[in-house]
Image (cartoon, grey):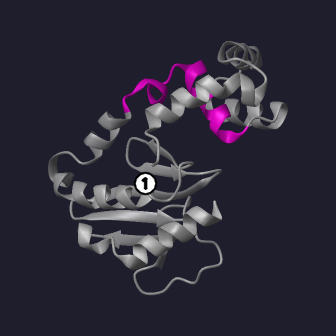
Amino acid sequence: MAKSPAEMAAAMKANLKEKTGKTLAQWLAVAKKSKLAKHGEIVKHLETEHGMTHGFANLVAHEHLGSAAAHTDDDDLVAAQYAGAKADLKPVFDALMAVVAKLGRDVEVAPKKAYVSLRRSKQFALIQPSTKTRVDLGLNLKGVEPQGRLEASGSWNSMCTHRVRLESAKDVDAAVKMWLKQAYAGA
């Protein structure tokens, strides 16, 4: 089953020295010494200059900057996305997460303020409650022709190649499950 974002972050911190050769404190010193102030700049520096993978670089950058993303409870982020007028969309999210939980143990579920990113070695999908009546499932399916419900992402989100519009949990059908599995396999 997929780990929660909090479990993933804890596991990454626990494995940081083994996987990268340095402890979190040592990486924080590297980030401080770089004198970079923006999250993206720190991530790029750690990746290009130190060979760190994106996930670990992102973790160190968040910790270095003391950003809310590193310390906010992920359940709170998801709850906020499906609050108020979008509360009726939570079953769509839950249905998608049930599919994601069966994909593999290496899925990283990373809630953001407006959406939830699904990653493996790279992002393969995202789940976003876009309107009060619709959840958009963004997928990275390079080389797959858009057809029917599987539309080109267009200007909706540049991080995904395709989008599927979902209005109820029933819309998370065999086709959606197949597209999610395909995106996961390509990540």
The secondary structure that dominates the magenta segment is helix
Q: Is residue 110 above or below residue 133?
A: above
Which residue sits at x=45%, y=32%?
6
What is the quadrant of residue 176 in the picture?
bottom left
Q: Is residue 49 above or below residue 158?
A: above
Q: Position of residue 63 (x, y in %)?
A: 57, 21
Task: Work out whether residue 156 or residue 143 is closer to the camera in this orientation and state it.
Answer: 143
Whether 85 is among the magenta residues is no
What type is the residue that disc 1 sits on? Ala
In this orientation, does residue 155 appear? no
Task: Work out whether residue 104 or residue 172 is closer to the camera in this orientation and state it.
Answer: 104
In this orientation, does residue 21 appear? yes
Left-right relation of 168 to 173: left
Whether 62 is among the magenta residues is yes
Left-right relation of 98 to 183: left
Q: Residue furthest bottom?
A: 148
Q: Is residue 146 above or below residue 74?
A: below
Which residue sits at x=45%, y=58%?
102
Q: Secondary structure at mark 1?
A: loop
Q: Which residues are magenta?
A: 53-73
